[in-house]
């Protein structure tokens, strides 16, 4: 049986912050603060109130989600347990391993969501339906 990750493996990483009277600074180094090599960075912005983004799972992609500005919630689901993480500081990164359903919601005005991804964009890596995700999970556990 493959040792599949559980919701406990989804963690908020406290990124370094250099406090300075001139303004604060944070940074991320691949394979140092996050356990994967960064192949892609994308960001989500100008989200109208009430909209939900990212309702899907990835088979391979690992990611780190950062609220660079403003705030939003990330709902993560391992097929059994759901957990909601509120991101509201630019020095918090939510690490989501592959194989989790996740949705981003409750975006504040002018929020900016940055996603560091372990893979290039690949439409085939997406699981778009929750039902399909549950089946995928079940087969994975065999
Ligand atoms: P998608 O990941 O489906 O966003 P959401 O789940 O929030 O709706 O991406 C939306 C569109 O953008 C989709 O047509 C694919 C495209 N896209 C890229 O071309 N490259 C990327 O890196 C990403 C993340 C999306």
Image (cartoon, grey):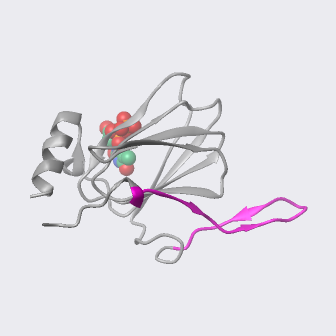
- Residue at the spot 23% in from the left edge and 35% down from the top edge: 130
- Residue projecting furthest to the bottom: 32
Q: Is residue 21 left or right of residue 119?
A: right
Give the quarter of the image for residue 141.
bottom left
Residue 98 horizontal/vertical position (percent) = 30, 57
Q: Quadrant of the N terminus?
A: bottom left
Q: Please check the rendered image and state whether residue 13 is part of the magenta-colored stretch, yes or no.
A: yes
Boundaries of the magenta span: 8-29
Q: Is residue 102 visible?
A: yes
Residue 28 horizontal/vertical position (percent) = 58, 68
Q: Is residue 56 left or right of residue 71?
A: left
Residue 86 horizontal/vertical position (percent) = 57, 42
Number of numbered discs: 0
Residue 59 horizontal/vertical position (percent) = 23, 54
Frontmost residue, 29 versus 74: 74
- Residue at the spot 47% in from the left edge and 25% down from the top edge: 51
- Residue at the spot 65% in from the left edge and 34% down from the top edge: 110
Give the quarter of the image for residue 56.
top left
Q: Is residue 129 visible?
A: no
Q: Is 99 rendered above or below residue 53?
A: below
Q: Quadrant of the C terminus?
A: bottom left
Q: Please check the rendered image and state whether residue 51 is part of the magenta-colored stretch, yes or no.
A: no
Frontmost residue, 83 versus 109: 83
Q: Is 7 rendered above or below residue 88?
A: below
């Amino acid at each position: 049986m493959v040792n599949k990750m559980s919701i406990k493996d989804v963690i908020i990483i406290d990124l370094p912050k250099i406090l300075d009277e001139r303004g604060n600074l944070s940074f991320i180094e691949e394979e140092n603060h996050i356990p994967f090599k960064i192949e892609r960075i994308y960001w989500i912005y100008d989200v109208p109130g009430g909209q939900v983004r990212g309702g899907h799972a990835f088979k391979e992609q690992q990611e780190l989600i950062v609220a660079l500005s403003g705030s939003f919630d990330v709902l993560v689901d391992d097929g059994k347990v759901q957990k909601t993480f509120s991101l509201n500081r630019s020095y918090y990164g939510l690490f989501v391993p592959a194989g989790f359903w996740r949705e981003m919601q409750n975006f504040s005005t002018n929020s900016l969501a940055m996603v560091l991804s372990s893979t290039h964009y690949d439409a085939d890596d997406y699981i778009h339906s929750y039902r399909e995700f549950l089946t995928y999970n079940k087969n994975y556990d065999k």
